Image (cartoon, coloured by chain):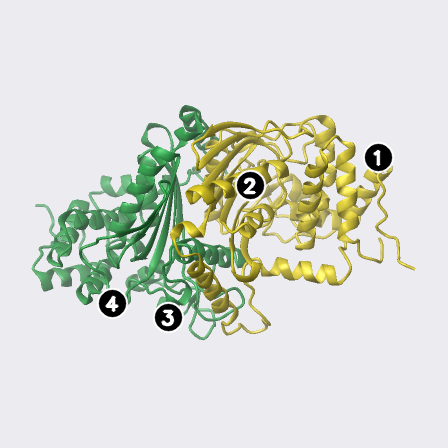
Chain colours: A green, B yellow
Amino acid sequence: MPELPVPPAALRDFTAGLLGTLDVPRDDAALVADSLVQADLWGHGSHGVLRLPWYVARLRSGAMTARTDPAVLSDTGPLLLLDGRDGIGQVLADTARRLAVERARTHGVGVVGVRNSNHFGTAMYWTRRAARDGCVAILTTNASPAMAPWGGREKVLGTNPWSIAAPAADGRVVAVDIANTAVARGKIHLAKNRGEAIPETWAMAPDGSPTTDPAEGVLGVLLPMAGHKGYAITFLMDVLSGALTGSSVGASVHGPYEPERRSGCGHLFLAIDPAAFGDPGGYTERVEQLIAEVKDVPLAPGVDEVFYPGEVEDRAQAAALAAGGLHLAEQTLADLLQLSAETGVPFEPGTAPR
Amino acid sequence: MPELPVPPAALRDFTAGLLGTLDVPRDDAALVADSLVQADLWGHGSHGVLRLPWYVARLRSGAMTARTDPAVLSDTGPLLLLDGRDGIGQVLADTARRLAVERARTHGVGVVGVRNSNHFGTAMYWTRRAARDGCVAILTTNASPAMAPWGGREKVLGTNPWSIAAPAADGRVVAVDIANTAVARGKIHLAKNRGEAIPETWAMAPDGSPTTDPAEGVLGVLLPMAGHKGYAITFLMDVLSGALTGSSVGASVHGPYEPERRSGCGHLFLAIDPAAFGDPGGYTERVEQLIAEVKDVPLAPGVDEVFYPGEVEDRAQAAALAAGGLHLAEQTLADLLQLSAETGVPFEPGTAPR
């Protein structure tokens, strides 16, 4: 394992170069690369370049098409429906973001449904983009079965992540990104790659028994966050993302780690322009009031600082950049080096500056 | 305590009659009464007629105005902003529901922000109404401080409830209604009224220590659901409900149990017409597929049946109606009888049929 951190630019260049060899257009490859490396920079290694080999396998099999070319199926002005036609999830999510923001600027609100998409990485990446565009944004997606209905013991529903982000003052963004399971499945994959045990509250083994083995957890059933609440939320997120958009739902959705199945996942992107409510300056003041109130609260014993939602990610990125880059899991590095060897796209993470 | 259940019609008549004596117009009084009794029928006693004395106190003080008369501040077509001018929360929520559905039928999506509102009871009551109108609906609200930011020990943020509901086949509705705390504050009030202890996971005492005493929990700090996730969700729900609509946010929002303070709470109501995506029949089939998949899952040990979200409430209502009515908490009954004595509006819950 290399002693030195991997510079983000090197990771981006490798990821984009690799996708380029698979016929992904240059801009799309750069977008996917940035979204994955950004997740690593935010400290969400479970949604970072760890996932690149899965995308590569799906592009190679043709389950995900390299040239994303969505079709517009409905357009009322403030609301659109796109058929993603099995293109790259990140490219479709960004198309939805761009259209939702554009329509919000015209109509106050923009809603874009996407059917027949693919895994788009971390939801916060897309809502934060819309927030940087000046909009309050909500993004939902469905995902392959990972969770049992409350009281059941087999996987039917996905983690169905969703994110809300909103602009604050001075370019700051407040943002939440939630998987409706106790943890995202990617965190169990990451623990497996790192050879670490998982808490018993994360997942059941395939036979329904508790487990601390990430290999069993990956095969077994994730537990919902907040008990029955997480189950109910994830069900309704499937309604928004899949049922409403005309995509697959429930057990019919396939995940990014299945190399040969089309995903069938769907998304719903909502953007609201605060200016449509007539007082954008007041909006920003109110968000800053919320930030100030949570930052100024008396602390619980043993706590140094309270963070507003999204601040942890910004701090993680600043720390990674200050340290010169990212420390990837050993298995992730090995996977990337193998892809480099297979394709001839250069990747030299362990090179020490002399 | 009466041996016999209270018939819902008697509760509705008393509630509406009582509000009528406080200058609430007849239709508005009937709406508030139905929304409170419906919460009791769904088994959500914490949001039922338990709250009537609070509303009465606020109407008497003038903190909440009896004649709700919202002003339209913005209207883009698919998006409106209403100033509730301190009217009754239920009346404003239903106005928002009606407008959001109407605009969704025209534009595919309707968004209605409400500022300067009041407590609207249970969020699911309004989203289910929109679902019965044929729309998928999301409703968010902010609320008075009940939760500490993650790592803090003083209340800054509300439970900020939110609900999503969606139509299924044959008039069925799937629905979730979430308070972002481990429990709704009302459940602690209900335990206090019932003289029952609360689990240690529900709330901290005012000094930050664990407690099983509901009286301490009411004064203390509720714990978020799912740890830091519940904190981040509730923060963003305040952005949607308060910051975006130009209402109060964070610690500036006042609760229904404060008789003399204007609330300042705000709501955001979103409706989407599935028909706008071009395939309403397919939409219904997909929701029914989800229902069938969760109902058909192999059961965990000791579980008799898996419920789809919202089914528990429908079952509770059917059981209450079959039993002839509702069993209210002793303190709640005493409060209602006192209101009856004060106002001369008749209420005879304990009358046995002979």
**Marker disc for residue A219:** 3
Neighbourhood count class around disc 3 (C-alpha, 10 Å): few under 14, some 14–19, many 20 upward: some
Q: Looking at the picture, which amino acid does disc 4 mark?
A: Pro
Chain-order first, disc 4 or disc 3: 3
Cα separation, mark 2 vs mark 3, equals 46 Å
Rendered location of residue A80, percent (x, y): 34, 46
Which one is nearer the viewer's eye here, B212 or A252? Answer: A252
- CA gap, disc 4 to disc 1? 71 Å
Q: Amino acid at mark 1?
A: Thr
Q: Residue furthest right?
A: B354
| Front tag of 1 and 3 | 1
Return the residue at label 4.
Answer: A259
Kindly indicate whether the residues beneath marks 4 and 3 are on one polypeptide chain: yes
Q: Are marks 1 and 2 on the same chain?
A: yes
- Residue at the image point whose x is 47% and y is 32% from the top: B243
The CA span between labels 1 and 2 is 33 Å
Helix, strand or loop at label 2? It is helix
Label 4 close to label 2 by CB (< 8 Å):
no
Residue A55 position within the rendered picture, expressed as x and y whole percent measured from the top left: 23, 60
Vertical comparison of A274 with B226: above or below: above
The residue to which callout 2 is attached is: B98
Residue A277's x, y, as percent? 44, 29
Contact (Cβ within 8 Å) of mark 4 with mark 1: no
Residue in the image at 32% along x and 31% along y = A171
Is A106 left, or right, of A11 in this rendering?
A: right
Q: Nearer the viewer, residue A207 or A92?
A: A92
**Is residue B38 shown left or right of residue B85?**
right
Q: Are marks 4 and 2 on the same chain?
A: no
Are the residues under marks 1 and 3 on the same chain?
no
